[in-house]
Amino acid sequence: MLYRTAGQFKTSYHADHALFPVRQDAILLGFILLLAFVVVPLTASEFTFRALLIPVLIYALAALGLNILTGYAGQLSLGTGAFMGVGAYACYKLVTIFPEMNIVVAIALSGFFSAAVGVAFGLPSLRIKGFYLAIATLAAQFFLVWLFEKWAWLYNYSSSGAIQVHNIDMFGITVAGPNATAVTQYYFVLCFVAVITWFAINITRGRIGRIWKSVRDMDIAAELVGINLMKAKLSAFAVSSYIVGISGALFVFLWRGAAEPVLFDIPLSFRVLFIAIIGGLGSILGNYLGAILIVALPVIISALPSALGIPIASATVEHLNTMIVGALIIVFLIVEPHGLARFWAIIREKLIMWPFPH
Amino acid sequence: MNVRPDPAQLGAPDDGIAKGDLLLDVKNVSLSFGGVKAITDISFDVRKGEIRAIIGPNGAGKTSMLNVINGFYTPQRGSIVFRGEERRAMKPHHAVRQGIARTFQNVALFKGMSTLDNIMAGRSVKMKRGLGWQMLWHGPALAEEIEHREKVEEIIDFLEIQHIRKTPVGKLPYGLQKRVELGRALAMEPSLLLLDEPMAGMNLEEKEDMSRFIIDVNQQRGTTIALIEHDMGVVMDLSDRVVVLDYGKKIADGAPDAVKTNQQVIDAYLGVAH
């Protein structure tokens, strides 16, 4: 009933091309944004910011980057973790070489480095596809992590081999480093993620998004409607790696505070891939839903017993956690193989029809 | 916005070639895959404004011929002159830029996309706004999007597929998919439209609809059409001139009536006693 679309007519193509042709969707998004920008910062604790909200946003952004490549352009990649690493190391070098540089600029620029690396490792996609391409990107994964370890210039020859984020100020407020407050970092990440998501939505619904989807659905036909496959695939690699690189920079500078090469190893790639798949390939919303399920849920489950005062050993909680999250992933994939985003689309459809079955 | 399109607006792009003049000239083309000779020394031409049929038994090299014309295969020998320009090896997306569009024997649509998006994808080449504008969406990118949407809606009206505008094409029945594919090819505003068995697997009513669309495209939009078809009734009624292939060789070329009575053509289709 709340979702009734009756009476909402489109009288121009302009109206039909609106982001939310259904009014209720816009209201819902406004509500979520209000929650994220106003309600949550006023109520959330330090722990909630650091363990839940900030990582969910950063992982959702990484998954969004991967989704553009895999979900929209149909090119499988297993190198996401390494591309995040490129973003993080590029940002680290930028802030150490140019200490005066604004951190927003540094993060935005670091994306270009990962985009360039992404394009270079995307070149095999011109010849191979599917699982074989995944193997080629796996090579990027191993090579780059090796490079992060061996190329001492990247971590400024520090003896630990790790990069450490120092206090970074922006307009007199500390946004990164040990002195930064959680709420500042949350706002910083939220603004970044919101703006990039908006850009990503616009790209995917326009001409370039259609080109990517054409390549994904049938590359031969795409070529025969005049699409240059090379340009289409490499632009997908560039945009995807750019977003992934930025998420990597945020990952280290606004959340972890320090990083060593092993952090960007293949488990990170798989984690982001799981988020994208469970959230729903070819959807923007899905990345957020997937990140909530994969990143936030384990934290909530492990915090639950102590919050409720149930005396269980923390090791047991961890075991239970793995089992519950694993089971949930399987259940969701059986109920809806196309991911949580499709799940929501079906619920929405039913709400629009309600109370009628068809 | 359900306006009956004005035929004058739907004209094919002005390519500076008068009706009846040479649009495509295939000269002594030979194509082989290893030892298999798909096409042997075939020459024929397509004139501006006509409907040209390519017929022949299975395996005669018809589809290979279309693949050569739109740059998918590069012939070993011979040359192709399109709009007065001779060309050799080229990529299919170059052929599109020159004004050649085609449909496939087995429908080759973008299954995950809606009808509207499929036809809009046909206009990708004509849209120019780059990544920067696309990111912002509002402004030039949206204006361009709407400008092309209007053209696409004309095609949707023309093909009478308004009701499936937002349906993913993977869910559509075969006949409608063929129609959407024709729509996508028309969206490219080609000077030469190649149709590979546009009526394969259709019932009589769908065939009649499709024939009507082909004639309308040819007459209202002035688009030159080269088509492959197995339904002889359709071929003889639609086409202005017919070229007949058999085992990769040209065995006849001319008006439908002349071809129909050609002894070699009859032999190719019915077989000869040895």
Image: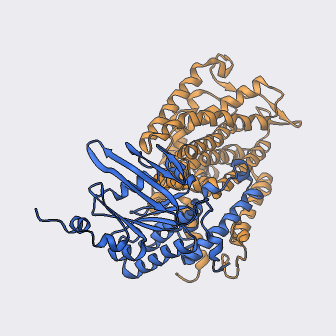
Q: Is residue A302 visible?
A: no
Give how far across and how far down residue A150 sits, in percent: 57, 19
To which quarter of the image does residue B127 belong?
Answer: bottom right
The answer to whether A351 appears left or right of B27 in the picture is right
| Residue at x 63% of width, y 19% of height | A160
Q: At x 84% / y 33%, what residue is drawn?
A: A169
Horizontal and vertical percent for residue B95? 52, 51
Q: Which residue lies furthest to the left in this view?
A: B274
Q: How many badges with numbers are in the image? A: 0
The residue closer to the viewer here, B186 or A211, is: B186
Residue A203, percent across and down?
A: 66, 53
Q: Is residue A181 left or right of residue A5?
A: right
In this image, B5 relative to A218: left or right?
right
Is residue A268 at all visible to an observer of this figure? yes
Expressed as whole percent of the image width and height from the top left, the position of residue A103 reads 79, 35
Q: In which quarter of the image is the N terminus of chain A?
A: bottom right
- Compared with residue A95, is residue A250 higher up or lower down, i.e. above or below? below
Q: In which quarter of the image is residue A50?
A: top right
Residue A195 located left or right of residue B258: right
Residue at 76%, 42% (x, y): give it.
A185
Chain letter, orange in picture: A
Q: Work out whether residue B59 or residue A280 is closer to the camera in this orientation and state it.
A: B59
Chain letter corresponding to the colour blue: B
